[in-house]
Amino acid sequence: MTEQSSWSHLKHSAPDFAARARSIIRQWGFVYAGTIRPDGAPRISPIEAHLVEGHLVLVLIPQSLKALDVARDPRLVLQSPIVNADEPETELKIRGRAYVLPDDELRDSIADAIEDRRGWRPVSWHVATVSLDLVSMMEWRAGDLTLTRWDPRHGLRGPEARRFDPQRGAYVTD
């Protein structure tokens, strides 16, 4: 993972956007992770997500199917929970790659942070850091969409207002 694709880079290049994304992750404490199964089909799983020392980290049970998926193919997507389809409010999506951390010092620091926040300590679990390819935030208000995106190459783009056009069956910009 390069420094440019870390949460720390996002935080420094787009601090307000990163703060809003952080609040969504902290609000729920978990995200849905889409991984790739051995046969190439997608798998969706809930997973604990934490922001520690400039890293977006995921806690994985070593022999869980999602951990085995990530070990084989690190590509994944993360999605914040949506609890109201009529008014989803703010939705966060992250596309990236997950890498299990071999660094005991960083793993210990992450375990300390998780214990402080959650009251339990991941001992034998894998801790993976996420390299960010794209972070998108969709804010839904009265059926309208405001899209803001960040990636390491282009930086912050948006916000971009979109409305649903039933004739096209798509969200369009005005």
Image (cartoon, grey):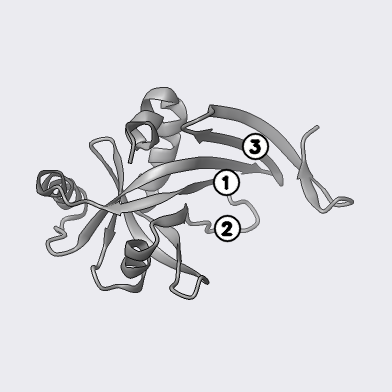
Amino acid type, label 2: Asn
Dividing the image into 4 quarters, which one contains the C terminus?
top right
Q: Earlier in the sequence, mark 1 or mark 2?
A: 2
Q: Which residue is mark 3?
A: 146
Q: Which residue is mark 2?
A: 84
Amino acid type, label 1: Glu
The residue tagged with tag 2: helix, strand or loop? loop
Amino acid type, label 3: Thr
Q: Which residue is mark 1?
A: 89
> Is 42 or 17 nearer to us in this picture?
42
The residue tagged with tag 1: helix, strand or loop? loop
Measure the C-alpha gap from mark 2 to mark 3.
17 Å
Q: For the residues labelled 1 and 2, say whether their Cβ atoms are less than 8 Å apart.
A: yes
Q: Earlier in the sequence, mark 2 or mark 3?
A: 2
Number of the label disc, if any, that sits on residue 118: none
Choose mark 2 or mark 3, whichever is in front: 3
Where residue 33 appears, as percent x and y from the top left, is 43, 60
Task: Tell me the crowding category of disc 3: few under 14, some 14 to 19, or many 20 or more residues within 10 angstroms, Cα based.
Answer: some
Looking at the image, is 77 positioned above or below residue 131? below
Choose mark 3 or mark 1, whichever is in front: 3
Q: Quadrant of residue 75?
A: bottom left
